[in-house]
Amino acid sequence: MVGEEERVIERLVEEIEKLKAGLDPSVLSGWYSKIENDAKASAPRELVDKIEVIQDPILPMKFEFKVSRRAVKYVIEAIEKNLKDMPFATRLYFQKVEELILKETHK
């Protein structure tokens, strides 16, 4: 019985570690970069310079997505395109980013 309890605890620890890893600043930075590049690749030439991600050098978990209203569509498409490939915690994070971007643009 003890062996089964230990295996359950080990699996829980593994799952928690996976969730933590999905919110690591370097993981988030990589996905922000991917989304930024995908959005720029699909946006018209005149909007490419209106899409930018800035990571705070002091607070590595803080990112700023600078996007013009006309370029929001391309950023949302890039987020949607990449969600299925993200770790679970990262996916939840970017779903919230998407929600915040849409909320901000509908003010």
Image: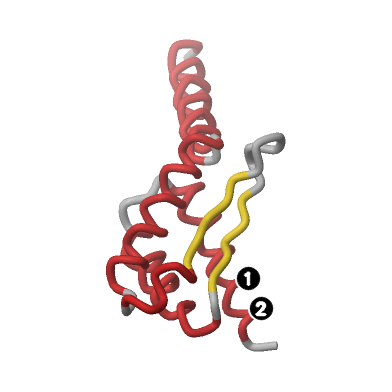
Image location (x, y in percent) of residue 76 = 44, 73
**Picture quarter containing residue 44?**
bottom left
Name the disc covering residue 69, or none.
Answer: none
Asked if 2 appears above or below 98 in the picture, the reply is: above
- Closest to the observer, 4 or 51: 51
Image location (x, y in percent) of residue 32 = 46, 52
Of the residues shown, which amino acid type is indicated by label 1? Leu
Say which element carries label 2.
Answer: helix
Residue at 46%, 55% in the rendered image: 91
Image location (x, y in percent) of residue 38 = 32, 62
* Residue at the farthest left position: 41
Of the residues shown, which amino acid type is indicated by label 2? Glu
**Picture quarter containing residue 60?**
top right
Q: Badges 1 and 2: C-beta atoms under 8 Å apart?
A: yes
Say which element carries label 1.
Answer: helix
Q: Would residue 83 be found to the left or right of residue 52 on screen?
A: left
Cα–Cα span, label 1 and label 2: 6 Å
Residue at 50%, 44% in the rendered image: 28
Asked if 21 appears above or below 98 in the picture, the reply is: above
Asked if 68 appears above or below 5 in the picture, the reply is: below
Query: For mark 2, does the 10 Å Cα neighbourhood hold few (<14), some (14 to 19), or many (20 or more) residues?
Result: few
Total tally of numbered discs in the picture = 2
**Picture quarter containing residue 102?**
bottom right
Residue at 39%, 58% in the rendered image: 35
Q: Which residue is mark 2?
A: 104
Asked if 103 appears above or below 27 in the picture, the reply is: below
Residue at 28%, 66% in the rendered image: 41
- Closest to the observer, 58 or 102: 58
Specify the quadrant that holds the C terminus: bottom right
Image location (x, y in percent) of residue 39 = 36, 67
Q: Which residue is mark 1?
A: 100
